[in-house]
Amino acid sequence: MGVGRRMKKQGPPTPLDESLVTRKRKQVDIPPTANGVGKKRRTAEGPPLMSGAILREQKATVNGKASKDKPLKAAKPNNINPKKAPSPPPVEEEISEEDENTDRIDDLDLIEDGLEGVGVSGLDALETDDEDIEDDEFDIADSDVVDSDIEQRTRMWSEDEDDSDAEEELNAANIEGLSRKLDMEQAIAETEAQAELEEAGMQTNISGDKPKVLVDDEDEDVAGGTSTLAPDLQLLRTRITDAIRVLGDFSNLAEEDRSRAEYTAQLLKDICAYYGYSPFLAEKLFNLFPPGEAFAFFEANETPRPMVIRTNTLKSHRRELAQALINRGVTLEPIGKWSKVGLQIFESPVPIGATPEYLAGHYILQAASSFLPVMALAPQEHERILDMAAAPGGKTTYIAALMKNTGCIFANDANKARAKGLIGNIHRLGVKNTIVCNYDALEFPHVIRGFDRVLLDAPCSGTGVIAKDASVKTNKTEKDFMRLPHLQKRLLLAAIDSVDHASKTGGYIVYSTCSVTVEENEQVVQYALNKRPNVKLVSTGLTFGREGYTSYMGKTFHPSLKETRRYYPHTYNVDGFFVSKFKKTGPTPANAVLAVNGKNSKQETTAVEEFVDKTPILTEEEEEAKADDFGGWDEEEDREYMERAKKAALRKKGRDPKADKAKAKSSDGTSNTEDGQAKKFKKTKKAC
Amino acid sequence: MRPLTDTETQTLFSKLANYTGRSLTHLITSSTSIPASSKSKKDEDNRHVFRLHSSRVYYLPLYLANLATSIARPNLLSLGTCIGKFTKTGKFRLHITALDVIAPHARYKVWVKPNGEMPFLYGGNVVKAHVGRWSEDCPEHVGVVVYDMKDVPLGFGVTARSTAESRRLEPTGIVTFRQADIGEYLRDEDTLFAT
């Protein structure tokens, strides 16, 4: 679907050119066949001037019909011709004038093309006039001598001969009928052109007055804004560009008594219809940019990014690899000054993902944007590094290559199926220092911590990679933009907690997403800054990219957020991306909300609230239990078991039960029967 | 994850020795990739060891194995380099992933010409016409590592005949039976790393 639309979208300008080209080819092609015939016949009878003029007119109209796509241009000659056609005498006057001025014009063909609209009939007459004189000389040249200059001339003459050939057939009888027919055709073409003009009224208006962008309701239905019919893409596009123009210079271009909001609403509606976004997402993305840039962004999302491979420096070098691939017929080029390992593939006769070099692990297919977080992470040799969401392993293997296979990388992915590809890539690229594990990344601080650097390429909505996966346009809802940031925030806290702040070389966290929305980027970073006073944003070390927002739609973020970097498909021709780098300066304070327990503590509070409601039921049950044969409920003994189970559960989660003892004791001190039950309830909650 | 038992070690080493010959010892000693300046404690840490995890054998530096103990067994998917796996009958099967480990220490080698690369990578045996070079004095049914002419290891297999016999072979005769090739990364991606 996307491709088709793109094709159509690119359509509008092309017909103009194409029709020109085809017409020219016709003029070139036809003559040789008519050439010989024309000559013979013409010698018998001199051509009447006037009829030649008429014939040229006929040609013009034919052309106008042949290229129906460009009625605007075709309309011009049509408008002019009828005036001239009925009055031959002025034409003759013109001839004499031109004859004096231009005795020998070498490339009449050219001039003719250029002036077609203006002085068609006059020039035509001139040609035929010349022809009579020159004819004999060129007869010889026509037949066998091949010369570039002459060839051009022969074409010129032969064309005229074509005309004169047809002229011959004219006689007094049919000339009148023919001209009538021509008139009719002209009239039809004219009305058609007029209709087209009206339809595409905006185009002509552009240079003149204010464009009409906002449409009435009935118009809208025609344009396909809401109707079930397929929308008129060309019209939509012009309307989008016009609206953007108006929004760019609102005070001058806007219609009176129309507000900016109206224009924006109309523009968004058109964008939804034209590109197929859900209205929600279109608005979200539109708000990120000024209107003109937003349009560029939407446009860029329709074209795929270049294919990029990353050289595996563990096994090869970029120059060697490039040479090997060039030998296979691949055209490629270094991706840019900012990367020493990237190669951009333009075209390849072999599948790039199945060459012997690929299988030998000399390179990996990796989008240019996913180099960036690793470059920001800047891993050093002999460090311990965590990649929290590693699959499919492009970044992990890049980290390993930068560390030259020393130190240790924990490559984690929550999805076991995706981890398979990760392991495959790790082995293929000859990475030897990696431990692949399958945890929910939120648990990681409890599994192992003390990392020198952590890379968190968080799961995201993918609004930066719409070019790759167009389904994002429609399947992301408001809920996703609440659920994903929530997860990202917890992941980022977990990442921060996993880092060793005292690391000699590191203590860095890189947070990146392939999304461009503020909710998933700046807001998440801001949240982490709020929750963890022991981290600060530092420069990513990336040489390009746009600064992150420090304020957005009424929200203000910490000024250091300008250290983060944003990447857009329309500015750098990479996927939309966000990279931020933190430095952890101190230990996480004891009262900080843990990524995992943050949720638990919330649950605890709710549990207590719920408990109040349920008290009577529980006591009732207790009474029943006491009453029955089973022997009742020993509160004291039970508490001991509960305590033990609780410790075991904590240990299982990788936490030190002794650390929580103080908390547990303090609550114990104030314990009464109700509290005990509350705790029991808490525990069950925790267990589930 | 655990170290190998004695019998497992024996099975594994006899298999590896098939390809590496006596240089197998280089695999186990710590001197493989460590500069001489490093200290003895570090030396010990960088010594490479074999570890068994869910019937697969991994080859990795000791410090990595120690770190991996923090990962619970069900959550651990892979560590270091996978060498191969023990079958249910107790035999050991080398995987293509072991190529990185055995290629630098290979005893017998076969180099295939460029026109023989693709047939081999698609899982074919090495025929005589495709052999560009081979180790002399290679006996029959012994492990060889297959390289392309640029010395990039492509896989490994066993010789079908000794070098002397192969000389008398017709061009279409098989010289080396394929056991593993790097094409498996694409062909068997799903099964190769299934745990």
Image (cartoon, helix red, strand yellow):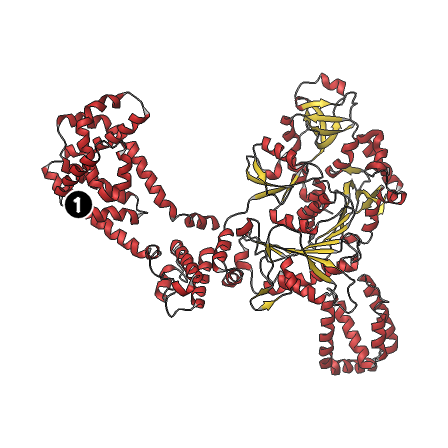
What residue appears at the point 11 percent right and 36 percent down from the top-left corner? Answer: A171
Chain label for disc 1: A
Residue under numbered circle 1 = A84
Compared with residue A101, is residue A582 higher up or lower down, i.e. above or below?
Answer: below
Q: Residues within 10 Å of mark 1 (few under 14, many from 20)?
A: some
Q: Is residue A571 visible?
A: yes
Locate residue A305, reporting x and y percent: 55, 47
Q: Nearer the viewer, residue A427 or A254?
A: A254
Locate residue A208, reporting x and y percent: 33, 58
What residue appears at the point 73 percent right and 19 percent down from the top-left corner? Answer: B166
Q: Residue furthest front?
A: A101
What residue appears at the point 62 percent right and 37 percent down from the top-left corner? Answer: A354
Amino acid found under the numbered disc labelled 1: Lys
Compared with residue B49, is residue A528 higher up or lower down, i.e. above or below?
Answer: below
What residue appears at the point 13 percent right and 26 percent down from the top-left corner? Answer: A44
Compared with residue B24, is residue B42 higher up or lower down, i.e. above or below?
Answer: below
Compared with residue A406, is residue A232 higher up or lower down, i.e. above or below?
Answer: below
Locate residue B94, reporting x and y percent: 77, 37
**Horizontal arrangement in the rendering, residue A472 relative to residue A86 (left or right):** right
Q: Residue furthest left?
A: A172
**Horizontal arrangement in the rendering, residue A4 relative to residue A166 (left or right):** right
Q: Quadrant of the C terminus of chain A?
A: bottom right
| SS assignment at label 1 | helix
Locate residue B122, reporting x and y percent: 64, 33
Q: Is residue A631 visible?
A: no
